[in-house]
């Protein structure tokens, strides 16, 4: 999924199902988060997409954004819901992992990469979230 917002709006205005699922039970929001398609994510959320939707592995859109190193999308999701409801931030997948656990996984080291991507982009809000959630800012690759 790319940031084809006019296409998304046309499909939704033509009664396409916002919560349609693929063979892995991923919704359009899951796919947009996986690809880091920020404008698509924003459009889907504004159209009422379920931010808590789970795929067959119980991964939420936030799990996908975190795993795929999409800090801007993570921030969008967290500020959309998790500030008022920690349910998204604390949602666990079938392996009992939160999105932050996935970021901090020593096999992927994406948490470390997200810290540096956020720092490089000057994204102080995301850095504050990661630090508040316990991300080690001194972690080495």
Image: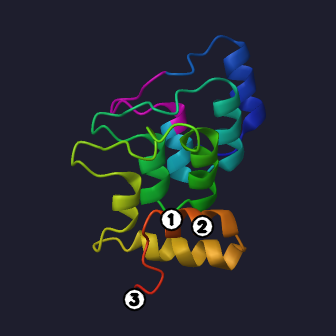
Q: Where is residue 37 in the image (x, y as percent from the top left)?
A: 63, 49
Question: Is label 2 or label 3 in front?
Answer: 2
Q: Earlier in the sequence, mark 3 or mark 1?
A: 1
* x and y percentages locating residue 96 in the rendered image: 23, 48
Read off the residue under disc 2.
128
| Residue at 42% across, 58% down | 67
Residue annotated with mark 3: 140
Which is more foreground, mark 3 or mark 1? 1
**What kind of element bears circle 1?**
helix
The number of numbered badges drawn on the structure is 3
117 magenta-colored: no
At x 47% / y 42%, what residue is drawn?
86
Distance Cα–Cα, label 1 vs label 2: 6 Å
Earlier in the chain: of badge 2 and badge 3, it is: 2
The residue that appears at 50% across and 41% down in the rendered structure is 31
Residue 127 located left or right of residue 89: right
**Quarter of the figure with residue 17:** top right
Relative vertical location of residue 133 with respect to residue 50 in this rendering, above or below: below
Q: Residues within 10 Å of mark 3 (few under 14, many from 20)?
A: few
Distance from disc 3 to disc 1, alpha carbons, whole Å, reads 19 Å
What are the residue bounds of the magenta stretch?
Answer: 20-29
Label 3, secondary structure: give it.
Answer: loop
Point out which mark residue 132 bears: 1
Q: Are marks 1 and 2 in contact (CB under 8 Å)?
A: yes
């Amino acid at each position: 999924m790319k940031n084809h917002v006019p296409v998304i709006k046309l499909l939704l205005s033509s009664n396409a199902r916002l919560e349609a699922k693929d063979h892995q039970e991923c919704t359009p929001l899951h796919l947009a988060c996986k690809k880091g398609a920020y404008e698509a994510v924003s459009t889907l959320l504004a159209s009422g997409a379920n931010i808590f939707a789970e795929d067959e592995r119980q991964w939420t859109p936030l799990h996908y954004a975190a795993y795929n190193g999409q800090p801007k999308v993570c921030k969008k999701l967290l500020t959309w819901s998790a500030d008022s409801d920690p349910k998204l931030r604390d949602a666990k997948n079938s392996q009992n992992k939160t999105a932050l656990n996935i970021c901090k996984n020593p096999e992927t080291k994406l948490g470390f990469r997200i810290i540096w991507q956020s720092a490089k982009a000057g994204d102080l809000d995301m850095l504050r979230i990661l630090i508040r959630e316990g991300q080690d800012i001194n972690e080495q690759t």
